[in-house]
Amino acid sequence: MTILEIEVKFLLDDVPAIQDRIRQLGGVGKGPVFETNTRFENESHGLKKNRSLLRLRQDRKATLTFKSDANKPDGQFKINTEYEVVVNDFSTMKRILEALGYHQEQIYEKKRETILLHHTTLCLDSMPFGPFLEIEGGKKDIKDMARRLGLAWEDRILLNYVVIFERLKKECQLPFSDITFNNFERFPTDIRDYRFLLT
């Protein structure tokens, strides 16, 4: 299925307060799931050069996703064209991608709770380097939801997690490339101490 993904992120300082506000607005989550995402590349790193992402995700199911920048520049929102399909065998899909010339470039983990609320999808993300909220939906609905949650629109983030990590890695000279909880336990680093990297 092809969709136009429109979203923004916010870095959270008080996760329980946001959770309480979401509940007050009628949002109920089903609890977090643990995601393991494998990002693939080709030999020439053409995907990254073309601002594209090929990802195989394992949580309660296995999902193959391709994202690319939409040809609609927008300074207010992060907009991607997205193709996504559920696959029934993670390992076999990984072998297919490798047979096609792609290799595992990076693993990144997250704990995510997804909540549908007022025409938006809210994703409470616990990344190894900090807590975030993603709001996805139509442009008007996203801005309205940010307002309802008491989030300052000027604090929105349009970067993806891979880019945020790359900036953090360079700034802190982190000696690893996989965004895993184990790696950050060995080298504790919190993006909230480096907010200037998010603009």
Image: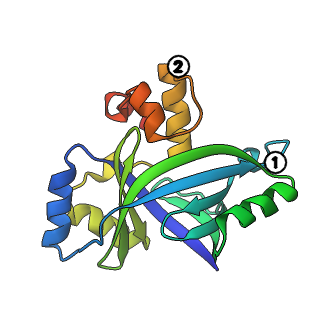
Q: Quadrant of the N terminus?
A: bottom right
| Residue 36 on image: x %, y % | 53, 54
Tag 2 residue: 173
| Residue 146 on image: x %, y % | 28, 61
Residue closest to the eye, 65 or 63: 63
CA gap, disc 1 to disc 2?
Answer: 26 Å
Q: Residue furthest top?
A: 173
What number is the disc on residue 188? none
Q: Is residue 101 above or below residue 4?
A: above
Q: Is residue 101 above or below residue 177?
A: below
Tag 1 residue: 42
Amino acid type of the residue that numbered disc 1 sits on in the rendered structure = Asn
Residue 119 sits in which quadrant? bottom left
Q: Residues within 10 Å of mark 1 (few under 14, many from 20)?
A: some
| Residue 142 on image: x %, y % | 36, 67
Q: Quadrant of the C terminus?
A: top left
100 with respect to 177 (left or right): right
Q: Note whether residue 189 is visible.
A: yes
Snapshot colouring = rainbow
Mark 1 element type: loop
Q: Residue at x 41, y 41 (%)?
A: 128
46 with respect to 29 (left or right): right
Mark 2 element type: loop
Q: Residue at x 64, y 58 (%)?
A: 55
